[in-house]
Image (cartoon, grey):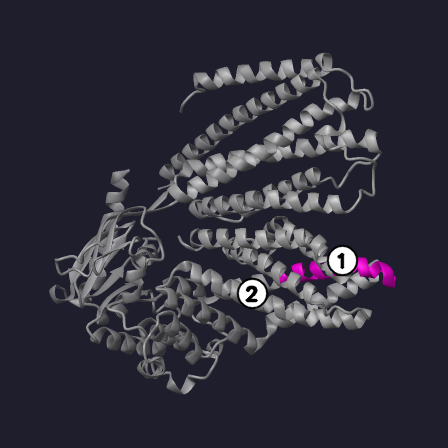
Amino acid sequence: MESKPRSLKILDAVTLILLLIATLLVFFFAPLEAVMGLVQKVFYFHVAAGWVGMLSFMIAAFAGVAYLRASHHKWDIVGLAAVEIGMVFAFINIVTGSIWARPIWNTWWTWDPRLTTATIMMLIYAAYFMLRSGIEDPDRRARFSAVYTIIGFLSVPLTFFSARLFRTIHPIVIGTNQPGAEGAFDMTGRMLATFLFGLLTFTFIFADLLWHRIRLGRLADTVEQLKMKTME
Amino acid sequence: MGLRYLHAIRAVLWKDLSAELRGREMLSAMLVFALLVILVFNFALELDAKTRANVTSGVLWVTFAFAGTLGLNRSMAMEKDRGCLDGLLLAPVDRSAIYFGKALSNLVFMLVVEAIVLPVYSLLYNTNLFNPGLILVILLGSIGYVAVGTLLAAMAVQTRTRDILLPILLFPVVIPVLIAAVKASSGFLQGIAIADIWSWLNLLIVYDVIFITVAFMVFDYIVEE
Amino acid sequence: MIERERDKLIIKVHKLVKRFGLKTVLRDLDFKVHPGEFVAILGPNGAGKTTFLRILASLSRPAMGEVYIAGYLLPAQAAAVRRIIGVVSHQPLLYGDLTAEENLRFYGRMYAVPALNERIHEVLDLVGLVPRRRDLVRTFSRGMQQRLAIGRAVLHNPEIMLFDEPHTGLDQNACAMLDNTLREVAARGRTVVMTSHDLSRSADLASRFDVLSRGDIVASAQRSEMNPNLLLSFYREATSASVQSGIRRE
């Protein structure tokens, strides 16, 4: 059994440090926004989490294509890891979105196209797990998962466009202006720096978690193999 | 190979239509279900004539989407029964011919249900739904729905959870079709200028093209072992 | 294009490996069949008989190894292989809501069988189902469904027939009828590979007996060399020997 490789240990440390710095930046470096106050700081994590959700989905879809072409089991592990992590971050995205929405527009939810799309993306992730749990044969499970991630990934931009088109034609019934857009409050230099750093940090967190999860997947496979040997 | 391919598609289509014409179980189930949904909406929404005009397309498409899953499930279950899918896979034609054959028969069944629901709805609510624009939207929307639905149904029928799984897999992915179809239908029914409806139709066409292509490319991986 | 094999083998399998996930079902399996042979593959449940037949039928892909059917390599030339094989598994592969005739018509079209109407009649005659041609398949007994399934399988006149435990679920009479049909089918110079766990039935039909146990062919004997009465002991010896060596291997 391989112990944690050195590069992973370094990545763990770097990620932790980045997260610490990012939190400090958010609370002490970035200025307090004039209109929204303290709650605006959720924005730094909210968007970064959303970004990771999309990134995961993209990686899962590419892993899916790779699996269909090469049939190499490792791509299935990558896909599964990406979807698992993506789901968590998509959830964080939605929850932080709610936290932001409540004090600002007095509502827990807005049918903002981005939020709507993020929710639908989560539903696709959930469906992915239900699909996997219904299949015994590992090869079929990997193939079907791969196909579904591809289909899901292709549908998400279309969902976003349809939701956005919907918004431009109809005015928003609840709430005032469009707070989801980046331009809703102008970002000062400090805010921008914090925001970008937040994105970087979350990307590192994603990579770190992905690597750990893939290792976990490989270990699980090894256990299965040993089990098989003892049973034969 | 080209002509053989088309003959195979036609053979699959003919087989599905013949089998259904015999028992008509699937069509009746879809129809009864669709009418039930409309009735429930009637009581749930309690609409006056004005509001109803806004809600009609939504009600229609929700109805179609749900009745559609019944048809998709049944159509694939027929192949699982008595191992017929293997029979199809043994035929010396490209596997995608099976996909197109099944998708076409699914489309036909869906259109039949829609063709019956429209006049019934018109009668029940004294609305005129005979609008060529609406019919175009129904066609485009159904094509998109069936293109993805056939593929996902082929997957779902091979899992342990089967029927339950299809709506879970299908609905999140088919949302762009539903949104665009509802908006475009609404547009046509309310007599909005076609220039405004155009973006929705565009979206439908793009969706249809993308997913028919993708489904055609991946269908092999779904059915092989 | 890969050329047809020069030696007179119609089926050639070399070091075939098939896995389901982490479990190896077929291991380094070698198998050869000459044209016109009727090979019965015997073996206990779980030995891998159905898996092996599905690979020969192009329904399943080998993980490793080579499979040549009439010189065509699987899975690369699967389409060519499908034209020349007829498959009968324990499921009939028939549509219950269609009549016998409609089922055959459907498959005839899928295989682009020429002069289809005449051929359908010929086949129904062969399997003894002409009076039931317009009846729905779901009204057929299992035995009749199996016979129609054979009809479906020979419709396009394949050189090679693959049967997967065709006697499953049939009573004595139905079995006897099935055997007659099998003999007729085999008589026309076709190559037949049939898996079975029913020794007595295969004893009458096959020209060669192979034993598949724990994923490999462990014994093979020609009917001419062996007294069919000794078939049972031959089989028992072969399967227990493989279990022993399997334990030793691990």
Q: Quadrant of the N terminus of chain C?
A: bottom left
Q: Amino acid at mark 2?
A: Asn
Contact between labelled residues 1 and 2, with CB atoms less than 8 Å apart: no
What residue would you read off at disc 2? B106
Chain ID of residue with mark 1: B
Name the residue at 58% across, 60% down: B143
Q: Which mark is residue B192?
A: 1
Q: Amino acid at mark 1?
A: Ile
Q: Picture quarter containing residue C3?
A: bottom left
The reply, left or right, for residue B211 in relation to residue C73 is right
Few, some or many residues within 10 Å of mark 2 (<14, 14–19, 20+): many
Which of C170 and A84 lies nearest the eye of the viewer?
A84
Which of C139 and A38 lies nearest the eye of the viewer?
A38
Which circle's residue, 2 or 1, is located before the other in the chain? 2
Q: Is residue B58 magenta?
A: yes
Q: Which residues are magenta?
A: B46-69
